[in-house]
Image (cartoon, coloured by chain):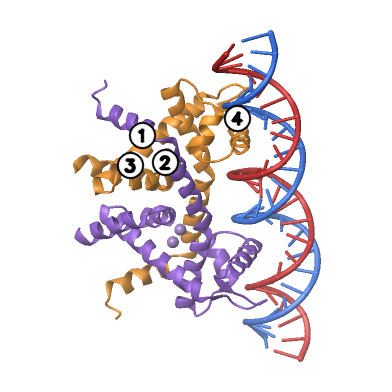
Chain colours: A orange, B purple, C blue, D red
Amino acid sequence: MHDDPHEVLHAASDDRSPDLRAEAFQGVRAARRNELAEDYVELIAELIHSHGEARPVDIATRMGVTAPTVAKTLDRLARDGLITRAKYRSIFLTEQGRALAKECRHRHEIVLRFLLSLGLDAETAERDAEGIEHHVSERTLALFSAFANRS
Amino acid sequence: MHDDPHEVLHAASDDRSPDLRAEAFQGVRAARRNELAEDYVELIAELIHSHGEARPVDIATRMGVTAPTVAKTLDRLARDGLITRAKYRSIFLTEQGRALAKECRHRHEIVLRFLLSLGLDAETAERDAEGIEHHVSERTLALFSAFANRS
DNA sequence: GCAGATTGTTAGCCTTGTCTAACATTTCGC
DNA sequence: GCGAAATGTTAGACAAGGCTAACAATCTGC
Ligand SMILES: [Mn+2]
Ligand SMILES: [Mn+2]
Ligand SMILES: [Mn+2]
Ligand SMILES: [Mn+2]
């Protein structure tokens, strides 16, 4: 029983230093705080590219939330310097917002291509990529990219 | 330029139905709402296994949060039927809590083994697994498992 | 160019998840 | 077995992110 490789793995994870583990959880919480901003700027960039402009109503439809939720979130993004916005007008990305959007789109595509190359169907791949993308380190992203290109 | 495979992928993701996309985001938000409960019950199960009991102070250390945060979270877990708890005593999992913990540990280990089998270092693998595990569908999990076993 | 439809905003409510400060209980060393 | 240390709880603050209801502005079709 103690030679079962599962036992070994389990024991190893049990024995990790509590501090190291706390750091991991803190990292996950930090990533979670950026998820919404990342998805918004990525979507805004995409709407600007495909529709010429980004309107709150289109963001609301695609995010699956109500209009007031979008309004409040956009106010936070403006406060954080990612977008500019004027009453009743469409949304613009700042330089910083464009940079983040580009990075997010890049990462999203790598994760998506990786999942597809593993053999996952397109719809599930899109759903999983939408969540996974925010929790992938640079190192993991590099491995995903290499794998997708190789196969 | 329009034959660039990246353009094609981008166009494809642009053209997905807004409703399908909204469903994906709603799914991600639902997953996010369960993350904390999943990490807590998984950790509680582990502490019970390795230390004989699960105490708030050990949870706080490993989660990297303060004791009052743990207390409030444990109250929510009790309310939701995942644990039982009495003042100043250690924490017990309910039947439902044990079932969830088992499922989470299983999923965590598959994601971890998968990342390791891709060639990731142990520490980064642990960190990324801690975030990714909550956003992996059954199908993706099956593919991860198969890949880790094959390689 | 106006009426109705669409879009956007504001106000206010709720839950979650984090914190600090203060206090209560339990445990440990001697 | 007592006092100090460790552990746990309670109260209360705050930000994020969701909602509904009500109202305001803009756009569109005739
Ligand atoms: Mn996403
Ligand atoms: Mn994305
Ligand atoms: Mn986790
Ligand atoms: Mn986990």
Mark linked to residue A78: 4
Which comes before the other along the chain, label 2 or label 1? 1
Provide the residue designation for mark 1: B13
Question: CA separation, marks 3 and 2?
Answer: 16 Å
Q: Amino acid at mark 1?
A: Ser
- Element under label 4? helix
| Quadrant of the frame with the N terminus of chain A | bottom left
Looking at the image, is mark 3 or mark 2 nearer the viewer? Answer: 2
- Counting from the top left corner in percent of width and height, residue D22 is at 75, 35
Does mark 3 have its CB less than 8 Å from ligand 2?
A: no
- Counting from the top left corner in percent of width and height, residue A96 is at 51, 28
Q: Amino acid at mark 2?
A: Leu
Q: Nearer the viewer, residue D23 or A15?
A: D23
Looking at the image, is mark 2 or mark 1 nearer the viewer? Answer: 2
Q: Answer above or below: position of A37 versus D4.
A: above
Q: Residues within 10 Å of mark 1 (few under 14, many from 20)?
A: some
Q: Amino acid at mark 3?
A: Leu
- Element under label 2? helix
Q: Amino acid at mark 4?
A: Ala
- Please name the residue shown 46% across and 20% down the image: A52
Q: Are marks 1 and 3 in contact (CB under 8 Å)?
A: yes
- Please name the residue shown 60% across and 35% down the image: A67
Please, which chain is the residue tagged with disc 4 on? Answer: A
Mark linked to residue A112: 3
| Quadrant of the frame with the C terminus of chain A | top left
